Image (tube, rainbow, N blue to C red):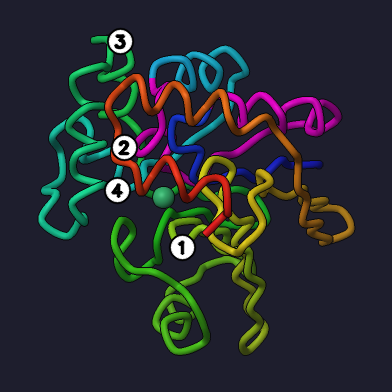
Amino acid sequence: MLYGIIADIHSNLEALQAILPELRGVDQIICLGDIVGYGPNPNECLEVIRQNRIVSIAGNHDRAAVGLMETVRFNDSARRAIEWTGAELTPANRKYLADLPLLLKFPDFQVVHGSLRSPLEEYIFGLKEALPTTERMSKNLLFVGHTHLPLCLKERGKEIINPGAVGQPRDGDPRASFGIYDSDKNLFTFCRAEYNIPPVQEKMKNAGLPLSLIERIRFGG
Ligand code: ZN
């Protein structure tokens, strides 16, 4: 099976549209959460997810946008964006987000937004945070999102992979980040796709979203 592995779209429709042609040949696309938050097109991104039958789990922003998670740990810009997002969502998209599971298990791997110890909140940046999660893994491979940083960690026969963020990369490369997993070969390929950033920034400006969020997508930082 070929899987498209995507994460942290963050309401960035142009970035999402840029990666879909690259994933045309895969059998299934899986989203590791944070479909919404930060960006200007939450409803449109959710329509694309639903129309393309992309399987998704919930991220912290998805939960917060529908009032199922406190925003106390969000910084000021993230909180302002999530309040804006919550007011924009259609009832159908609100229900879709509220119903997303926290974890999913596939024949060869598991998926979670943050970590298996704390699905919505913990960030896996390195081996230190990875250890409590590897102990909880029932498969040898786990895909995570949340940090917006592409990552591949191996520890005691277990592997944790983060495909990076589609809609708000933070590794200094503004192109949309994602990956393709070939389960027959047990091979993961990191991919990047360029997209037109200024129209996204323009829509963010018009929506009154925080300047820091508008700026950072240009640098990928
Ligand atoms: Zn995120």
Q: Secondary structure at mark 2?
A: helix
Looking at the rendered structure, the kind of residue marked 3 is Ala
Q: In the rendered structure, which disc, 3 or 4, sits on the residue that comes first in sequence?
A: 4
Looking at the rendered structure, the kind of residue marked 2 is Asp
Relative to 108, does residue 83 appear above or below in the rendering? above
Q: How far apart are labels 3 and 2 at the CA level?
A: 14 Å
Quarter of image, res 5:
top right
Mark toward the viewer: 4 or 1? 1
Per the image, the residue denoted by label 4 is 60
Per the image, the residue denoted by label 2 is 62
Neighbourhood count class around disc 1 (C-alpha, 10 Å): few under 14, some 14–19, many 20 upward: many
Image quadrant where one finds the N terminus: top right
Q: In the rendered structure, which disc, 3 or 2, sits on the residue that comes first in sequence?
A: 2
Per the image, the residue denoted by label 3 is 92
Neighbourhood count class around disc 2 (C-alpha, 10 Å): few under 14, some 14–19, many 20 upward: many
Q: In the rendered structure, which disc, 3 or 1, sits on the residue that comes first in sequence?
A: 3
Highlighted magenta segment, given as a residue range = 13-42
Q: How far apart are labels 2 and 1 at the CA level?
A: 15 Å
Whole-percent x, y for residue 146 in the image: 43, 57
Q: Which mark is residue 128?
A: none
Q: How far apart are labels 4 and 2 at the CA level?
A: 5 Å
Per the image, the residue denoted by label 1 is 147
Neighbourhood count class around disc 4 (C-alpha, 10 Å): few under 14, some 14–19, many 20 upward: many
Q: Are marks 3 and 1 in contact (CB under 8 Å)?
A: no
Mark toward the viewer: 2 or 1? 1
In the image, is the residue at mark 4 within 8 Å of ligand 1 by its beta carbon? yes
Q: Are marks 4 and 2 in contact (CB under 8 Å)?
A: yes
Mark toward the viewer: 3 or 1? 1
